[in-house]
Image (tube, rainbow, N blue to C red):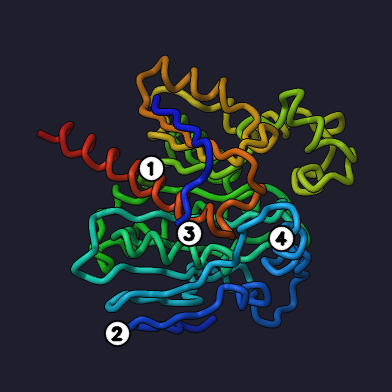
Amino acid sequence: MKDRSPAAPAAGGGRWESKVSRSVTIAAICLAVAGPAAASHTVDDSYTVARRFADYRAHYPGIRVPVLAPRSGQTMAFDLTYKSVGERDLHIDVFAPAPAMRRNQGLLLAHGGAWRSGSKAHLYALANLLAQRGITVFLPEYRLTPEARYPAGMDDIRDALAWAQQHAGGYGLGRDRIAIGGTSSGGQMASLLAYRDTATPLPGRTPPNALIDIDGVLDATTPLALQYENAAGAASPLAQWLGGSFEQAPDVWRGASAARYAGPQSPPTLIVGSGMARFTAGREAVLATLARHGVPTATYTFTDVPHDIWLFEPYLDRVAMEIDGFLRTVAADMRSHRR
């Protein structure tokens, strides 16, 4: 297991496709208002970049909203339909590297927002940086608590991964070279899918080749996690998603905890944390289990930073660097095993 904690973080239903032929700069603050188009389903828009920035700027000197500056040759496709549920279309965005930079690695990232809010647009800045490093990034929307409770969102992310794998060839990828990850609640969901679906493989499904958990809870039943995730009982965001408090639905909470499924079939795992232990509760147990089974792992832990390290500089670039480095290691291991 590689574990690095710095003394200070480094600085650093239609189809819309944009092909960048020259550098275009877009202030990421615009993402604060980016979200789904008008729809018949309920949307909680309380979690925005602008609001978080306003909350943080006095407490974290040097924090800044990133600038989205795509490089020549990158492509960005927005709102591709990957799934329909009745009359409801679910969309995915794809950030692809310039052909000269492209390498055979994809990553599907699920946004955070306490299972009830957030937007795939919140990950545009991170996706852009990863695309510049040769990674093809898939950003799905999925049903949140106001629209549908667990396991609907899990089913959506699983289907989004299947869509990415089905279309992998068109992006110069092998279907077995797509990792899954997420931020905060999206990290919890990605971890659960990565571990549970590999513990009990689904027929016809290709497992992700790595997991990237960015400040996502790995075991919601630990005392530390329950102190926060169950603090308001049935009114807690996780309880609302799962359909009841821990006291009301203990088996559901256990079944929705990724740590329960970690084992020899789990994918190589990178855990990037803000340093607030509550957000990666269960981490040590998961790392111990994976180490016992010889599954490659790495961790990177910030200090004195906000939770949303994927939204702001000077933390965002380090997050991208850690993901890039880990996926390069995974690719090298895959090549050596095939020799």
Within the image, what quadrant is residue 189 found in? top right
Q: Is residue 215 left or right of residue 166?
A: right
Mark found first going from the N terminus, 4 or 2: 2
| Disc 4 to disc 2, C-alpha distance | 34 Å
Marks 4 and 3 in Cβ contact (< 8 Å)? no
What's the residue type where badge 1 is placed?
Answer: Pro
Residue labelled with disc 4: 57
| Disc 1 to disc 4, C-alpha distance | 40 Å
10 Å crowding of disc 2: few (<14), some (14-19), many (20+): few
Residue labelled with disc 2: 21
Mark found first going from the N terminus, 2 or 1: 2
What's the residue type where badge 4 is placed?
Answer: Arg
Dot 1: what SS? loop
Tell which tag, 4 or 3, sits nearer the viewer. 4
Q: Which mark is residue 161?
A: none
Residue labelled with disc 3: 160
The percent coordinates of residue 53 (x first, y second) are 70, 63
| Disc 2 to disc 1, C-alpha distance | 34 Å
Judge whether 181 appears above or below 78 on screen.
above
Q: Looking at this view, is 142 or 279 the one in front? A: 279
Tell which tag, 2 or 3, sits nearer the viewer. 2
Marks 1 and 3 in Cβ contact (< 8 Å)? no
Question: Which quadrant is the C terminus positioned in?
Answer: top left
Dot 3: what SS? helix
Q: Looking at this view, is 26 or 265 the one in front? A: 26
Task: Give me the residue at 58% from left, 59% from top.
Answer: 312
Task: Give me the residue at 81% from left, 30% from top.
Answer: 227
Residue labelled with disc 1: 207
The percent coordinates of residue 79 (x first, y second) are 51, 76
Judge whether 142 appears above or below 50 on screen.
above
What's the residue type where badge 3 is placed?
Answer: Ala
Task: Give me the residue at 61% from left, 58% from top.
Answer: 62
